[in-house]
Amino acid sequence: MFFFEGDKLKLLSVLARACAILAGVLLTVITLITCVSLIGRNTIGVTLVGDYELTAVTAGAAIALFMPWCQLKRENIIVDFFTAKVSSGGIAMLDRFGSLMLGLLMFALAWRTAIGGMSAYASQTTTMMLGFPEWITYWLMVPPFALTGVIALYQVFFGNFSEQGE
């Protein structure tokens, strides 16, 4: 199978990195828009219309876009209080179980987000001030959720990238 052959899932690694870079670009753009709006409001009394809407839409998409990279690097929040005295084999088994649960959750989230996007498209819902179509944000979130699920399932069946020298 193409995804599971080659140099430690090079394709998934590249896709996860591309998602993280896009998320960083989105957050940088929205930060600049927010700065322009705040400076305008505090100096000349003029603000950008819809800056709050742009921030909300962009932040949601950026969070979803960061998730594949986070899972790839195993940088999720882990509470090791209960596993401090568990063997490394036991921890590896718990990590795989956690990856399985996360993978299933990400696929369910991708599915339900796609349904939400189709519903938003069908009803043509938009943001209040700018009239930005909400379905676009939903659909921006579906691929990174699915990619996170694929990465998590890889980790279930083949172990973590860090265990393989990635």
Image (cartoon, helix red, strand yellow):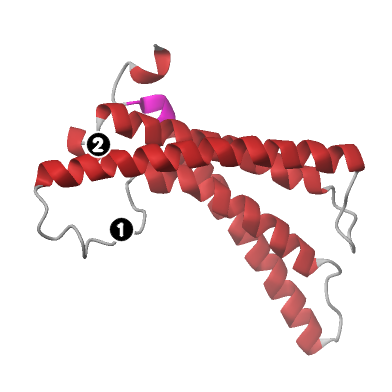
Mark 1 — residue?
A: 78
Q: With 66 as the anchor, is 157 left or right in this view?
A: left
Q: Residue at x 66, y 39 (%)?
A: 112
Above-or-below relation of 87 to 103: below
Q: Which region of the structure is painted magenta?
A: 9-13
The amino acid type of the residue labelled 2 equals Glu
The amino acid type of the residue labelled 1 equals Ile
Position in image of residue 40 (x %, y %): 79, 80
Mark 2 — residue?
A: 166
Q: Quadrant of the C terminus?
A: top left
Q: Is residue 166 visible?
A: yes
Q: Are marks 1 and 2 in contact (CB under 8 Å)?
A: no
SS assignment at label 2: loop
Q: Is residue 163 magenta?
A: no
Q: Is residue 10 magenta?
A: yes
**Residue at mark 1 to residue at mark 2: CA–CA distance:** 20 Å
Q: Residue at x 55, y 40 (%)?
A: 145
Q: Which mark is residue 119?
A: none
Q: Quadrant of the N terminus?
A: top left
Q: Residue at x 26, y 27 (%)?
A: 158
SS assignment at label 1: loop
134 vs 31, nearest the viewer: 134
Q: With 85 as the anchor, is 152 left or right in this view?
A: right
Q: Residue at x 21, y 61 (%)?
A: 82
Count of picture labels: 2
Position in image of residue 92 (x %, y %): 19, 42
Above-or-below relation of 128 to 166: below
35 vs 63, nearest the viewer: 63
Above-or-below relation of 7 to 150: above
Above-or-below relation of 59 to 70: below
